[in-house]
Image (cartoon, grey):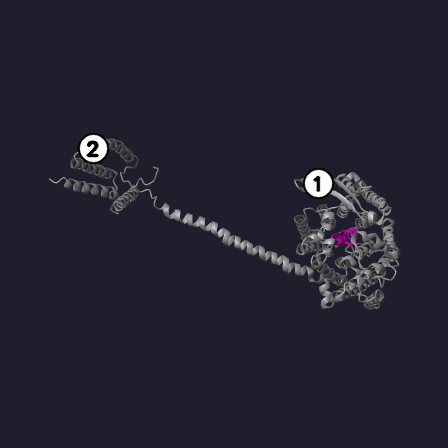
Amino acid sequence: MENLIGLLVVAPLLGAAVLLCGGRRLDRGGPWIGTLFAAASLAIAAVLFAGLLGRDADDRTLDATAFSWVPVGGFRADVGFHLDQLSMTFVLLITGVGTLIHLYSVGYMAHDERRRRFFGYLNLFLAAMLLLVVADNYLLLYVGWEGVGLASYLLIGFWQHKPSAATAAKKAFIVNRVGDMGLSIAIMLMFTTFGTFAFGPVLERATEAGEGKLTAVGLMLLLAACGKSAQVPLQSWLGDAMEGPTPVSALIHAATMVTAGVYLITRSGAIFNAAPDAQTAVVTVGAVTLLFGAIVGCAKDDIKKALAGSTMSQIGYMILAAGLGPIGYVFAIMHLVTHGFFKAGLFLGAGSVMHGMNDEVDMRRYGGLRKYMPVTFVTFGLGYLAIIGFPGLSGFFSKDKIIEAAFAKGGTEGWILGGAALLGAAITAYYMTRVMLLTFFGEKRWQPDERGELPHPHESPRTMTIPMIVLAVGSVFAGGLFSINDVFLKWLEPVTGHAEGHSPVSALTVTAATMVVLVIGVAIAWAQYGRRPVPVTAPRGSLLTRAARRDLLQDDFNHVVLVRGGEHLTRSLVYVDHSLVDGVVNGTAASVGGLSGRMRKLQNGYARSYAVSMFGGAAVLIAATLLMRAV
Amino acid sequence: MNPVNYLYLAALLFTIGAAGVLIRRNAIVIFMCVELMLNACNLAFVTFSRLHGNLDGQIIAFFTMVVAAAEVVVGLAIIVTIFRSRHSASVDDAGLLKL
């Protein structure tokens, strides 16, 4: 049983190796080989899941040590795996959604010449992500963490012939690097404090360390989470990451990799529980991001970028929930799983639409597609209902719980967080309705592409629609199934712990309020985009709209503060180097040179002048001798 | 006669020689001035020998003469060679370590 955990990671890794080293003869079968390896790891995950279910609730952990990685004196780093309910949930999500998206990519990438490499990278991503969640220590987690960063970089820049894609890949990599720095500092701090990286000892003994140290570790972990999960202030890369192929956006930048930050915070719960200041920072980041992403999502006309803003916002909800402590961890993960279903489904739907519309991404040039792409319409529509929290669908259960938990935080803080979460729900309803109306309803606003051809929208092939259907089913039922008898809560409780909060408002009131804001959001969107025709070119818009189109000026901010600031810093350093350091060196050289230039003139070659020196010297010596004698 | 007068003479001769070495350009004249300085020294040695009543100064004067004789041979040979190649005995013309 334990050995299977290693195999879980090795299977997709092997797939990546086969595909990336196999050469051109695998070009043809590459997509299916990749899918097969992904499916193999899903099968292993299923076996492990069945094994865990067969045990008692308190005994559902598997530990395995594969080999000793870095044994140096007292320092030990092992490649060891730890599978408990939390990692199992992630493993099922990653392999499940991963396999579906592999299948989808078979259709989506059918005409791409480099698809073998694409599937190799996808498999590599699966391996790294699985390693991240099954690692039993922070150092190995870091390996997976960097691995998903690499896979993300390779896949965002997959169409590297487009300069925008290459730039976006670099941007994602560099911004992530800032977060990774946080994680590595956190790991070093852990090592100096506890002398080990392993989850067990670090988390059990977390309370032994001083609160200041724990706060530092927590803040560094939060920085790491911000980078990977695109949270304010490291959020700027996610929108540009949409340059990658759509299946990548669905798998990596919606369902799995960007949720790694939530995993990290939930996994390190013991540290955050003992460091209230770090928790405050976490909820602040979550609340700010959930509004930030939602506002950005409202203004974007690019369907994928609108969904990216939404992803940012939804992960903001999860981070917010994770920052609430034991009252929120379970709901963070529950929302993460349901979000994995509906957001991956929405992205796949967006990909399907783009597939049918000659890769057009501007929603203002869609319109009226529901008749032409019925399957996409229905699955996308179900995902839409799930994300806005329509009663009975997945998002309703998970998001409602988070809003309740935010209120249950208590005090002014609770009211602020709960209010932000409610406001976010209204904006979510607004922007998702906007996407839905612009894409599938209204008149046809199709425009000819650069070759002058009008698009002929058509339903996508079955390899693409089947994953969409499966994910749509998940988005409809997952939340409900999780909530029957609180099975999800009971499943995760042994790992994350759970506490009931004391909400100042009753659960029913929260639900009612959520419904009201949902209706308001949908109604505003309907008034703006459903009732009257939509212009093909975007109107100028208000100041806020224009700012939101520019991602609320995040790039401008980064440019002014970080890029310009960095340039000024380096320029002043160069100036100091030139004037001070080089000044000393050059000054010494110049003074020696000048002195010797003057001394050189003494050597004029005239015997008489040398004779004068000799006589002068002799006279001085004699005079000195006489003087000394006299004294 | 007071032997100290010889010392004054020696100082006078030495000074004349030194001034000649420093001032004149002709190598032969400089050479003669160097001889003058050497002989001024010899005179001083002999005078001191006489004053102190031992022979050390006289012996050193002989040594000086031997060295001076050797020096004259080598020095004149060099001066003659330079004169042949440059048609001038001026020391300023030979200011470089090459022809």
Q: Disc 2: which chain? A: B
Q: Circle 1 sits on which residue?
A: A69
Residue B50 lies in quadrant: top left
Residue A286 in sight in this render: yes
Name the side, left or right, on which A367 lies relative to A562. Answer: right
From the viewer's perspective, is A142 left or right of A11? left
- What number is the disc on residue B56? 2
User: Up-down: is B78 above or below A465?
Assistant: above
Q: Residue furthest left?
A: B1
For residue A371, what is the image quadrant?
bottom right
Q: How many marks?
A: 2
Q: Nearer the viewer, residue A471 or A179?
A: A179
For the magenta stretch, what is the residue range? A249-269
**Disc number at residue A456?**
none
Q: Relative to the observer, which residue lies in front, A439 or B2? A: B2
* Residue A154 in sight from this viewpoint: no
Q: Residue at x 34, y 45 (%)?
A: A602
Amino acid, disc 1 = Trp
Alpha carbon separation for disc pair 2 and 1: 91 Å
Q: Position of residue A474 (x, y in %)?
A: 86, 54
Whether residue B60 sits left or right of residue A232 in the image: it is left
Q: Name the image quarter holding residue A385.
A: bottom right
Magenta stretch contains residue B8: no
Instruction: Characterize the local packing of mark 2: few (<14), some (14-19) or many (20 or more) Cα atoms within 10 angstroms.
Output: some
Q: Secondary structure at mark 2?
A: helix
Q: Is the N terminus of chain A in the top left, top right, bottom left or bottom right quadrant? A: top right
